[in-house]
Image (cartoon, grey):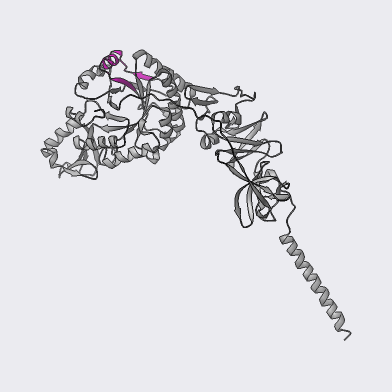
């Protein structure tokens, strides 16, 4: 019996020790940590970097705090807030385009606060918050008194719901009591709940921290409303008082100008002619000119406007290089405005094709700046675009539709020289081009261009494909020679075109998808159905006279 007592005592002691150990482990597991977070490590910043939040989501990019001002990366601002901030890295200029003015800002330009508008750190350009809010409908709220500085950018103006804390509450790095403490918030302070999950809520505090609090600590709700005083700039447009019926006149020599009146005798209803007069020649903004004052005067006497075309077709022109320099864009625009004055032009037609994606931001900036100059002189700016496709989205039709007067869809070249055989402009292709453009550009500014040409496709016995472009008149002659009449071709309802094929054992195969009255009539029906601003035709002289009974937009 004496031996049993010590044994029970020992077991009791061991049980107590075990219970104590388990209890301590439970305490360690479930007791809230009081460890403070390293805020620099938590937010991922150091030095004069600013933690950057967009609509309460922390961004990978960071801002800067310099000269007692908040600066945000221009590239980030362009991507998320306002695409009209343009940074010229070649000439170290920040350019901003208003409807009637182009602003040029460098490192010496000061804002209202007296601080520089632009800051450069390494290869990155930054723009001051006060400059952003001057031209952008956003709220920017900085928190710069703490060691780790933060800035919140909010793009919405709807009311926010804020909730008060029912007691002193730690805001933690993550949901759960083991999350280290980012900041301690007193009872009664307010937080904006961003999301809730399993008893924990991600919140933004009034003093500009983001972390997690226990949902049980959330009290009453208070709505916070915001009122925007920002006024969107209005980009006034020049427009004709009737539907546009434009023809392009391809001019390749001074003598070509003399053909215009004879060619126009074949037409009816044309109110705009766009001669191909200006061709870029290098990356410094130089171009050749075939402009002719007598040509303009003659068309004006007929009540026809002249929108001179500028192209970038020369192999010596790298558009992404040429337009990336602000001084080159400015010099080119000034020169074009001199042409407007010298020849009395009514408009300009911009036909820059085959651009690389890297040219995108420079090209749209050129259009913005050119629009300011055209607006000042009350001349029309029209821009030619391919049918919308993912590969050419960088042409930025949406912005074109704001700053330019007309956006012209080149509704052809569905199949082109060097590619596989097929129609120049099938009905589904044209319809998709119109609908895709209308998703970004108002119908009052959209002109659809139709082809006055057809391709005859040839595939030799070795399978090599080539094609010849024929005007409608010549294509009809080819059909008569090879088929007798177009009715011997088969009508393809799905393409809205007559189709013909010839197979010769020695010469191979020839195919044609014929553009003529019926096919062009269907395209004109689309222009009317979608109530577009008009039609454009490539090119003058390719058409028989009776086609103008079909191609008309003003009855």
**Residue 109 coordinates in the image, percent (x, y):** 59, 22
The picture quadrant where one finds residue 260 is top left
Q: Is residue 412 visible?
A: no
Q: In this picture, is 218 found above or below 413?
A: below
**Residue 37 coordinates in the image, percent (x, y):** 71, 48
Q: Which residues are magenta?
A: 287-308
Q: Is residue 554 magenta?
A: no
Q: In this picture, is 26 found above or below 504?
A: below
The outermost residue toward the left is 484
The outermost residue toward the bottom is 1
Position of 35 compared to 543: left or right?
A: right
**Residue 299 coordinates in the image, percent (x, y):** 27, 17
Q: Quadrant of the C terminus?
A: top left
The outermost residue toward the right is 2
Residue drawn at the location 38% of the way across and 33% of the way down: 442
Count of marks placed on residues = 0
The picture quadrant where one finds residue 72 is top right
Position of 90 compared to 333: left or right?
A: right
**Residue 70 coordinates in the image, percent (x, y):** 63, 32
Residue drawn at the location 40% of the way across and 23% of the way down: 282
Which one is in front, 265 or 89? 265
Position of 390 compared to 517: left or right?
A: right
Position of 192 compared to 301: left or right?
A: right
Residue drawn at the location 26% of the way across and 15% of the way down: 301
Which one is in front, 546 or 221? 221
The picture quadrant where one finds residue 160 is top right
Q: Is residue 432 visible?
A: yes
Residue drawn at the location 46% of the way across and 29% of the way down: 362
Q: Is residue 305 magenta?
A: yes
Q: Quadrant of the N terminus?
A: bottom right
């Amino acid at each position: 019996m004496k031996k049993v007592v010590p044994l029970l005592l020992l077991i009791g002691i061991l049980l107590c020790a075990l219970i104590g150990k388990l209890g301590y482990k439970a305490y360690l597991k479930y007791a809230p940590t009081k460890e403070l977070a390293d805020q620099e490590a938590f937010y991922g910043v150091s030095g004069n970097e600013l933690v950057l939040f967009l609509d309460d989501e922390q961004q990978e990019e960071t801002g800067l705090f310099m000269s007692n001002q908040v600066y945000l990366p221009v590239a980030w601002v362009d991507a998320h807030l306002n695409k009209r901030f343009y940074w010229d890295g070649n000439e170290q200029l920040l350019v901003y385009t208003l409807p009637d003015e182009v602003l040029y800002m460098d490192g010496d330009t000061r804002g209202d606060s007296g601080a520089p508008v632009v800051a450069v750190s390494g290869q990155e350009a930054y723009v001051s918050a006060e400059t952003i809010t001057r031209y952008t409908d956003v709220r920017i709220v900085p928190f710069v008194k703490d060691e780790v500085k933060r800035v919140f950018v909010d793009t919405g103006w709807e009311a926010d719901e804020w909730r008060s804390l029912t007691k002193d509450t730690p805001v933690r790095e993550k949901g759960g009591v083991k999350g280290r403490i980012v900041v301690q918030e007193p009872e009664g302070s307010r937080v904006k709940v961003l999301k809730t999950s399993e008893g924990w809520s991600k919140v933004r505090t009034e003093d500009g921290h983001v972390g997690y609090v226990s949902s049980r600590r959330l009290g009453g709700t208070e709505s916070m409303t915001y009122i925007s005083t920002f006024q969107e700039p209005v980009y006034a447009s020049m427009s004709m008082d009737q539907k546009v019926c434009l023809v392009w006149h391809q001019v390749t020599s001074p003598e070509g100008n003399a053909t215009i009146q004879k060619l126009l005798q074949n037409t009816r209803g044309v109110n705009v002619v766009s001669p191909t007069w200006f061709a870029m020649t290098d990356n410094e903004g130089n171009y050749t000119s075939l402009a002719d004052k007598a040509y303009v005067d003659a068309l004006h006497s007929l009540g026809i406007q002249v929108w001179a075309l500028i192209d970038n077709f020369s192999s010596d022109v790298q558009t992404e290089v040429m337009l990336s320099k602000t001084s080159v864009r400015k010099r080119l625009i000034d020169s074009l405005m001199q042409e407007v004055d010298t020849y009395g032009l009514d408009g300009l037609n911009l036909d820059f094709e085959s651009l690389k994606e890297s040219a995108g931001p420079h090209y749209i900036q050129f259009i913005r700046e050119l629009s300011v100059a055209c607006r000042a002189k009350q001349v029309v700016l029209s821009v030619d675009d391919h049918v919308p496709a993912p590969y050419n989205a960088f042409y930025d039709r949406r912005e074109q539709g704001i700053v330019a007067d007309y956006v012209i869809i080149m509704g052809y070249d569905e199949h082109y020289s060097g590619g596989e055989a097929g129609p120049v402009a099938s009905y589904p292709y044209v319809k998709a081009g119109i609908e895709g453009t209308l998703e970004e550009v108002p119908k009052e500014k959209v002109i659809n261009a139709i082809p006055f040409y057809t391709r005859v496709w040839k595939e030799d016995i070795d399978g090599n494909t080539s094609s010849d472009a024929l005007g409608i008149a010549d294509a009809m002659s080819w059909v008569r020679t090879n088929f007798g009449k177009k009715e011997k071709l088969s009508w393809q309802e799905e393409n809205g075109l007559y189709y013909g094929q010839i197979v010769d054992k020695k010469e191979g195969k020839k195919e044609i998808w014929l553009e003529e009255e019926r096919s062009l009539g269907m395209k004109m029906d689309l222009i009317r159905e979608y109530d577009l601003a008009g039609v454009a035709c490539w090119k003058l002289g390719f058409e028989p006279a009776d086609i103008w009974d079909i191609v008309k937009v003003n009855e």
